[in-house]
Amino acid sequence: MSLEIVFSGGDVDRAAHRRGEAALRAREPSARWAVAWRGRPLFRETGGSLRLAWTGATELKALPDLSTLPSVYLGEAPDGPRFAADATAALPDLAAPAQSFVDATRTELTPGRVFADLRAVMAQVDPTDAGDAATAKGLLEWHRTHGHCARCGAPSEMEDGGWRRGCPACGAKHFPRTDPVVIMLVLHGDRALLGRQAIWPERMYSLLAGYMEPGETIEEAVRRETAEEAGVPVGRVGYVCSQPWPFPASLMIACVAEATDDAIHRADAELEDAIWAEKAEVAASLRGEPARFTAARKGAVARTVLEAWVAGRISL
Ligand SMILES: [Zn+2]
């Protein structure tokens, strides 16, 4: 099924065969960097939309020479090589943004160039840039949190243009993590199962979701998570689509599933509430009309799946 998925696509060719020459590519005059600060990409604000601010090594006086920062090689764009660099340590004077579920604040670096929380602005980012921003964010975050070898504990080093870390002490190679998450449209007739977590914005309900566990198939994870969170038994499971979700390292695997009973028994404390929602009221909430709940935010795959279901594009 072809659905529009935020964070998919992008115009940078990963050019995996060139990762070994990343240091050389960084010296090309056409090299450009995606800059991140505290996990937030730098954007150019133009009108209402945000473009990733691809920046030359010495283009902005507010930043150090980007070729001197630890960089990951994203690949090749039509007009030259692309990198991502974390400038957090180089910008100690910028005030830290607030920590919240979705932080809409933007931190200005220079006029027209702002650092913004990717999750807060995902629906405004040009689709061509969103995928590149997700790759950059995911990769930089992995390096930030995986500085030591998971086998022997020694400090590890960036290799292969940032797509691997190697341990000089024991020789282990470590690769960027992707954590699969199942997110499911559980249906009972013309109703969908929605839940809410206590930390979410008030009245927001969304699809149930959970991390896959080792030794599980996608179908088994859908059944286990739905049973754990809502006590609802699930029969058939089908695949719908997937979405990279770099907060910090998830891959959302969207499924449609058939509930074989509609009684809800919340056993664990993960959800604050779970409800069955009629298709008509889901449609109303997606249109922004008064409803029992507000649906997931634009750009999140939960919303994409609910929109496709309301439009009659998903069935079991
Ligand atoms: Zn090691």
Image: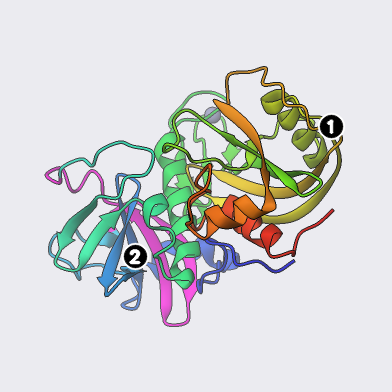
Q: Which residues are magenta?
A: 68-94
Can see residue 185?
Answer: no
Residue 283 visible in image: yes
Q: Amino acid at mark 2?
A: Trp
Q: Is residue 186 left or right of residue 284?
A: right
Residue 65, image x, y percentages: 21, 61
The front one of 228 and 262 is 262
Mark 1 lies on residue:
261
- Taking the magenta stretch, the answer to whether it contains residue 24 is no
Label 2 SS: strand
129 to 237, vertically: above or below: below
Q: Which mark is residue 24?
A: none
Q: CA distance from mark 2 to mark 1?
A: 52 Å
Front label number (2 vs 1): 1
Q: Is residue 1 above or below residue 153?
A: below
Residue at the image point whose x is 51% and y is 74% from the top: 11
For residue 224, what is the image quadrant?
Answer: top right
Q: Is mark 2 within 8 Å of ligand 1?
A: no
The numbered mark at residue 33 is 2
Q: Residue 87 vs residue 301: left or right? A: left
Is the distance from the Cβ of mark 1 to the nearest ligand 1 atom less than 8 Å? no
**Residue 127's x, y, as percent?**
48, 70
Q: Amino acid at mark 1?
A: Asp
